[in-house]
Amino acid sequence: MLNCYIIDDEQPAINVLSSFIKKTPFLNLVGKNINALETYPVFKLGEIDLLF
């Protein structure tokens, strides 16, 4: 299982990626955000394997 995170400035793109991730059995969506700077604390935890 790969933990993944989505960062994009367009909400429709986040929605599309989220739906594809939910349909992929080996991906686990940990979170999503439109602001890259707000996600820095998440990456410091070291739990993200894949970033979109």
Image: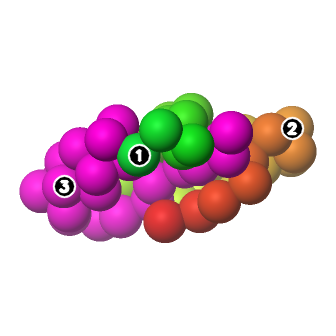
The residue wearing badge 2 is: 45
Disc 1 marks which amino acid?
Thr
Task: Name above or below for residue 34 compared with residue 42.
Answer: below
Task: Name above or below for residue 29 compared with residue 16.
Answer: above
**Does residue 18 appear to the left or right of 43 in the view shown?**
left
CA separation in Å, label 1 and label 2: 24 Å
> Which of the 4 image quarters holds residue 30?
top right
Percent x, y for residue 35?
A: 44, 55
The residue wearing badge 3 is: 16
Residue at x 49% of width, y 65% of height: 52
CA separation in Å, label 3 and label 1: 13 Å
Category of crowding for the residue at label 2, using alpha-carbon neighbours closer than 10 angstroms: few (below 14), some (14–19), many (at least 20): few
Q: Secondary structure at mark 3?
A: helix
Which stretch did the figure color magenta? 1-23
- Verify whether residue 43 appears in magenta: no
Q: Secondary structure at mark 1?
A: loop
Q: Say the numbered circle drawn on residue 24.
A: 1
Mark earlier in primary sequence (3, 1): 3
> Which of the 4 image quarters holds residue 49?
bottom right
Percent x, y for residue 26?
A: 57, 43
Residue at x 20% of width, y 62% of height: 13
Mark earlier in primary sequence (1, 2): 1
Category of crowding for the residue at label 3, using alpha-carbon neighbours closer than 10 angstroms: few (below 14), some (14–19), many (at least 20): few
Disc 2 marks which amino acid?
Leu
Residue at x 23% of width, y 44% of height: 19
